[in-house]
Amino acid sequence: RKKRKRGASPSPCRSHGHGHEPDTAPAPPPSPEPTRPAWTGMGLRAAPSCAAAAASAAAAGAEQRRRPQLCPPPLALLLLLLLSLGLLHAGDCQQPAQCRIQKCSTDFVALTSHLNSAIDGFDSEFCKALRAYAGCTQRTSKACRGNLVYHSAVLGISDLMSQRNCSKDGPTSSTNPEVTHDPCNYHSHAGAREHRGGDLNPPGYLFCGLFGDPHLRTFKDHFQTCKVEGAWPLIDNNYLSVQVTNVPVVPGSSATATNKITIIFKAHRECTDQKVYQAVTDDLPAAFVDGSTSGGDGDTKSLLILERESGRYVEMHARYIGTTVFVRQLGRYLTLAIRMPEDLAMSYEESQDLQLCVNGCPLSERIDDGQGQVSAILGHSVPRTSLAPAWRGYTLEAANAQCHEKMPVKDIYFQSCVFDLLTTGDANFTAAAHSALEDVEALHPRKERWHIFPSGSQGTPHGRGHWAVSLGLPCLIFIVFL
């Protein structure tokens, strides 16, 4: 075979007409060590081999000096530009940048997983966590500029801040609760315990309420109608005591209602001294017995009274035990609703077992059927007198209509409203039942348990439940007045 003439091999740059190739073909440049690109998709910077990058740059420079200019200046400029861009990031060889959006998201979940939208201070704590999340994303923005998850997180933070009216400036949550938790904020140190792995689940909360004649909803969501005349403890544990005093509503009736509430917030280390609150009919103060409106030192009080409606509605927020108490006066009587962490509510001695919120009313003090149904006591003949217009002019139909205006769902609160109207004739008990249901919706941690339906009428509030009210309430009223 004939040898190919020297210089006959095609040159990618020959078409541009730049000179002739040298008489001797240059040795091929040494193969550089394979390197990873300076960046990869989704904005995650790879860790290039610095030695390989330096060797490649040196070899390229040496070859450029040995070989004559064969390619056009534009391509050479492009190669130099790419080389210079690579050298600009030479510092990254020592500490390669990494997109840490996953760490930011994990920290945000840890800061908020223990929060409950029903708890006190939720918005404040959530905004702190959002600001910490935003700060974390800003610190990793350079390395995450091509990461779709990062950009989604940034947009999500902005939306949540708008929804919660969070300011961009302000305190932020720490990702190390062990160091910074507030000992006088139950939610803070409960979250710290969970973050450390001490608790597998967020702290649980319990609800208890008392209203009307009175009707009691226990921590176990049992609903009872009781007599309990005189002073009775609702709660008596190591952190809180609540006592109510009930008096007869109508002469000759065993039904009672609450006209006095005493609440004792027990002293708790450095968080607060003992504080006593007392309310009686027509005297619902917005202060403790000693005249103070808060407990604890510092700008953020660990115990605080807020007056929502003068002489009618006050709230007490005990941050150090994660507890909220609502007290209202409706008509001549008082109502109470409370939410408390389960671990604290169940912290009491054996001698403190008489607590209506924990164990309900004693059997001898109940005037329902044992299941909370004041309208379904059967087995008694309906006295004819009970079918006549009821006490003080209320008929069963009128009581049903009035209660239905406030409470369209015919659950146990509706039923209690009807019972109270027929028993007392006092229209204020309609407002009491309605407010009690509103307090449940504000404080009860589980939405699916807000409504309690009488047995046989759950899911059919317009069916058999109405039959039970129609037939059973007159029977119960007859029994109450015996």
Image: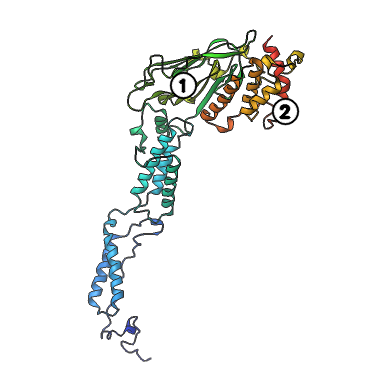
User: Is there CB contact under 8 Å for labels 1 and 2?
Assistant: no
- For mark 1, give the secondary structure: loop
Residue underneath mark 1 = 310
Distance CA(mark 1)–CA(mark 2): 41 Å
Of tags 1 and 2, the one toward the viewer is 1
Quarter of the view holding residue 360: top right
Under mark 1, the amino acid is Ser
- For mark 2, give the secondary structure: helix
Q: Does the rendering let one see residue 454?
A: no
Q: Which quarter shows the N terminus? A: bottom left
| Residue 410 image offset from top left, x and y in percent | 65, 28
Q: Is residue 50 left or right of residue 214?
A: left
Under mark 2, the amino acid is Arg
> Between residues 233 and 55, which one lies in front from this camera angle?
233
Q: Residue at x 39, y 45 (%)?
A: 104
Quarter of the view holding residue 266: top left
Vertical order, 348 against 411 (above or below): above
| Residue 129 image offset from top left, x and y in percent | 39, 39
